[in-house]
Image: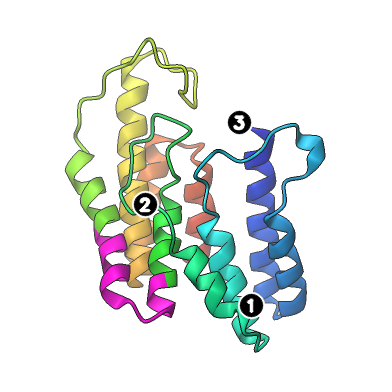
Amino acid sequence: MSKLFLVSVTKKLDHLKAMAEQDIEHAEELLEKALENPLNLGEGKLEGTKDNNIYYYLGIVKEQLGKEEAEECFRKAELGVDEPAGAMYYYDQPADMILYKGFANRKLGNTKAASACFNKLMDYGERHLYDEMKNDFFAVSLPDFLIFEDDMQRKNKAHCHYLMGLANMGIGDKEEAKRQFEKALSYDYNHQNCRIYMKMTE
């Protein structure tokens, strides 16, 4: 797991805590810092990273503070692809960025575009849940050291339930979202994003 990923998880939890405590100015400060990579990490963001989640929450806090930049943040949050990818390669756009792309579209009044984002997450999860996964022995970008084929099947099922959980968060069904995240964790106990989003359903 990369240092950059661990930092991003910590930042995500910090600004949500500040928002929950109505410390909006502190949340704004944390989110703006989250857009900068600490120099001491020795690594940067992958090409194509859009930071949809950060810009969405930044739009929310700027909106609450009455700042005009809120709409600009939402417009940045709705950029990027809206087609989910599999769980196998680390350079694919994280699936939760599609969730925030949908949220941002909803804030901008683009309800059809928002629904399309959530529907694509659900559709991918349902269509690929029972896929037979095969190992690509020549791949150089696998996120984990995968040897046994059963690991790949379980990871795929976890990923699909995770996507369906995100889709249900998008449409506002937190109870079903939590159920899907729990299913994902039954296949991959260490799925960090599942645990983060499951907390957000509470």
Left or right, 30 with reference to 149:
right
Q: Earlier in the sequence, mark 1 or mark 3?
A: 3
Q: Which residue is tagged 1? A: 61
Regarding mark 2 in the picture, which secondary structure is present there?
A: loop
Q: Nearer the viewer, mark 1 or mark 3?
A: 1
Segment colored magenta:
105-119
Q: Residue at x 21, y 39 (%)?
A: 128
* Tally of numbered tags: 3
Image quadrant where residue 153 sits: top left
For marks 2 and 1, give the CA distance: 24 Å
Tag shown at residue 81: 2
Q: Which residue is tagged 3? A: 1
Q: Earlier in the sequence, mark 3 or mark 2?
A: 3
Left or right, 171 with reference to 196:
left
Q: Horizontal and vertical percent for residue 32? A: 71, 63
Instruction: Categorize mark 3 by other alpha carbons within 10 Å: few (<14), some (14-19), many (20+).
Output: few
Q: Horizontal and vertical percent for residue 167? A: 32, 60
Q: Residue at x 58, y 79 (%)?
A: 70
Regarding mark 1 in the picture, which secondary structure is present there?
A: helix
Residue 106 part of the magenta-drawn span: yes
Instruction: Categorize mark 2 by other alpha carbons within 10 Å: few (<14), some (14-19), many (20+).
Output: some
Residue 91 shows in the view: yes
Amino acid, disc 3: Met
Q: Horizontal and vertical percent for residue 161? A: 32, 47
